[in-house]
Each structure stands twice: as C-alpha cells, then as structure tokens.
Image (cartoon, rainbow, N blue to C red):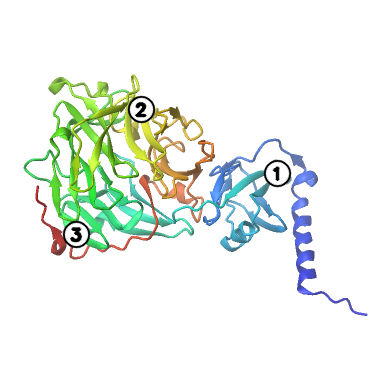
Amino acid sequence: MPILFNKYTLRTIYSLFLVFLLSSCSGAEADVQQTGYPPVFPDYTEVTVPSAFAPPRFRVTVPCEKQRVEFLAGQEQLVVKGSEEIRIPRRGWHKLVQTGTPAIEVRVAIKQEGRWIAYEPFNIYISRIPIDRYLTYRRISPGYSVYGAMGIYQRDLYTYREKPVIENSFAEGSCVNCHSYAAGDPDNMMFHIRGKQGGTVIIADGKTGFADLKTPQTLSAGVYPYWHPSGDYIAYSVNVTRQLFHSSPDKVLDVYDLASDLVIYDVKNDRLILPPQLQDSTIFETFPAFSADGKTLFFCGAVSSGEESDPLELRYSLYKTTFNSDDGSVGDLITKVLEIDGKSIAFPRPSPDGKRLMFTLSSYGTFPIWHPEADLYLMDLDSGRVRNTEELNSADTESYHSWSSNSRWIAFSSRRNDGLHTRPYITLLNEDGTFTKPFLLPQSTVSYYDDLLQSFNIPEFSKGSVVFSPRGLKKHSRPVSY
C-alpha cells in the first residue's frame, strides 16, 4: 500500500531535515564549540529591532570558508548559508517575526580549515512598538574643506529602499543641509541650499516655497532650524562662524561662533520675527528647540568675552524662554536650565511626549561631530535629573539625534565604527528610562558600509515620504518681511 503525504507532513519532514543539516555543523555535533557570541558586523547580538523593520543582515568578521546561520522563532526555522555575508531573505525574516515570539534565536557556525566551529546562540529581540517608517539624512564625504557630491536622502525603514530628496548636482557648487520636519510631517519640511542659488526650501502644508532668510537686520541666513509643533513657526539660529584647524594629531577641526542670535520665521505670513531678547550680543544663542506643547523655546548659549574670545573656552549651557504661538512672541525672561561645569551642551531635542530632553555633551564649542569625547545625555524635564546614557555611548563621537513621533525610538549618529565616518544607529527607550543596545541601520548588503565612503548626518524620523521637485523653485519664492 503506498504511503501518502499531505502538505503538512511534508513541511514537518522538511523542517526536521533542516535541523539535521544544521546540527551537522553546529551545536553539540560541531567539531569545536566556541564560547561567547560570534564576532559579527554589524553587531546585532542581543539588539532589539522593530517588528516591521528590514532584516538585519551581517557577516562573521573572522576568516572562514563557509558560514551557516540558523534563525529560530517558535516553530519557524530559517537556515541561511554564505561565504561572505548572511543575507536574510525578507520573506523568511517576516515569517519569523510573525510568529509573535519576543525574540529570534540566532545560531552561527563557521567552517575553518575543514572544521566546523559553533558559537553560543544569541537573540535578536522583536519589539511591537511602532517606529516611524522613514529616516532622512544627508550623505556627505567626511572631509571639511571640499564637500563634493552630497545629497539629502530618505530611507524606507521597512525595506532597503533609499531615494534622494535633493542632490547638490542640480546646481554646481551648491550645498544642501539642515533638513527638518514639523513633528515628523513630510508635508511640513524644510532644508537649506547654500551657494549660487542659495536659500531655504520650505514645504508648508504640502506646498513648496523658496525663501531668502538673510535680511539687513540678521547676522546671516537661517542656520540651525526647529519647527514649532503647530507647523506655523520655525526657529533658526543666525550665525557668523569660523573654522579652526588644529595642529594636534588628536584634533582635526572646530567650527566656532563669532556671533550668534535666534530668529523666528512665521511660515503662514512669510514674516521673520527678530526678538530683541534673543539678539543679545553678549550671548551666543544657537540650537533652538520648541517643547512638545510649543509653549517653551529651548536653546543653547555661551557668554561672549568679545573679540578676544578663545574658541576652545566657549562652553554652552541650556536656556529657555516662553513662546506665544498666537503672535510668535517670546517671553522677556531668559532662564538658564542647565550648566555642566567644564562641558558644552549642543542639539537639545525634547521628546514629543514632553517628558525628556536629549542633548550632546562635549568638552567645548558647538561642533561635536569632530569631538571623540562627545556623548549623549538625557534630562528628565519634570525632575531636572540628568544622566549619561552610557548604554548608547562609545569611545568615539556620538552627536546628532532625533526622536520618533511616539517618543520610544531614537536615531543618532556615531563614529564608533572607524572614527571617521558617521553612521546611523537606532535604539529603543525602555519603560524604565534606559535604552536597548543600539544597532546600525541595516542595509541590503553588509559591504554597503565598506563601499560607501560617506557620512550620514542629521538622521531625522518622518511619518511619510517627502514629495519634492527642485523645478520651479524661484517661481514659488516667498517674499520675507520683518
């Protein structure tokens, strides 16, 4: 009598066959059982990733002839083999995620000199907490004198797809920088263009305009931006800066202020507001940031000692004032919120839920991307307590950071890989106020980070895809009054 197999029986047999294959080169059947996690790049051991994320592909960093990796989640198994990289199929990865298990177990084995070596398994934890689908960043060579090819790009975090928002090839010699969203809304977004066709591109309520924010009354055009949560205002610093090149081998470059003020741009009325209390020549005001409720304007400030100021002695504190969204006015009282002795604060970023504020702390100045000692710190806005987020920081530079719209995910830039290229990392804020182990943004191939000799600057979350075309910008210019 013939033996009949239905599709479920065949699936069970196939699964057992996969287990047999893997057990022949890992676990107890391996020639060598290695202690510790496998050395992999990117380091995805014991990280927490969003359930909707693109698969975290990696490679073993020790020389080997073959790699074999088993992924286990509930009753689902996935075996991936490779000689250079472990490229997890998206469909297979999402099958594992959809089992609903809190973690995917990863078992790695490599073949060296004819022997199979198995490492201790590690977990990739799966979070069901949503993350904004898109991340926008500028890609630029890590130099400081000639920027060459650059662009602002938007990455779909659910896939590996990346698209340009704008590249500087549209105008010779131009620079594009400082993109910013109003509460992650792609219909309210802006960025600067520097050069022959310079100005500020402002997308408001889905309509694109072009504004020149330099006036006879301001030090410069707008520099560091931050949107009011209503989308009706953008706070900018206006700065006069200089570059400082160091002779010491452990320092390369600093950018420092000769003068710096804050201005408010009224988006709906194309009007530049110049609050006199934020035009104080004795204070270098910079890095504005509105609170989650829009009633407070935070900023960084350093006391100027005049033309004799030593840029290496400039240390910035955190200040705040009130803001009235009815007319765009700021309060007369300027309050120093936080001063850390011998340190300088940059990039204050309040969480959208209004509970916390993250900032970058370095030894001096306002250009922490070239400071290896720059770290991320977190402030509780209710209690005022401040802590070093040691679980995020490394021996090299951590600088710019942004919150997801639900205040649970953080994207930040770090030079921990090679000390030169800034790369985007992501982490989850736990209920107890700590962060999970940060992970490098996955790419379709691991060699992407080897081949792309550019830095990722200003990683910003957004809830949707930006729709923008540089054609006809001058036709849609915004006449700015003040």
For the point 38% across and 59% down, which residue is it?
464
Callout 1 crowding tier (Cα within 10 Å): few <14, some 14–19, many ≥20: few
Q: Amino acid at mark 2?
A: Ser
Residue 213 in sight here = no
The residue indicated by pointer 1 is: 113
Give x and y (percent) for residue 227: 28, 48
Q: Earlier in the sequence, mark 1 or mark 2?
A: 1
Q: Secondary structure at mark 2?
A: strand
Give x and y (percent) for residue 216: 6, 42
For the point 12% across and 38% down, which residue is it?
219
* Marks 1 and 2 close (CB-CB < 8 Å): no
In this rendering, position of residue 252 left or right of residue 474: right
Give me the C-alpha separation between circle 2 and circle 3. Answer: 36 Å
Give me the C-alpha separation between circle 3 and circle 1. Answer: 63 Å
The residue indicated by pointer 3 is: 209
Q: Amino acid at mark 3?
A: Gly
Label 2 or label 3, whichever lies nearer to me, is: 3
Q: Secondary structure at mark 3?
A: strand
Figure check: 283 above or below 191 = above
Label 1 or label 2, whichever lies nearer to me, is: 2
The residue indicated by pointer 2 is: 362
Give x and y (percent) for residue 281: 13, 28
Give x and y (percent) for residue 115: 74, 44
For the point 66% across and 58% down, which residue is it?
99
Q: Amino acid at mark 1?
A: Glu
Q: Which mark is residue 378?
A: none
Q: Earlier in the sequence, mark 2 or mark 3?
A: 3
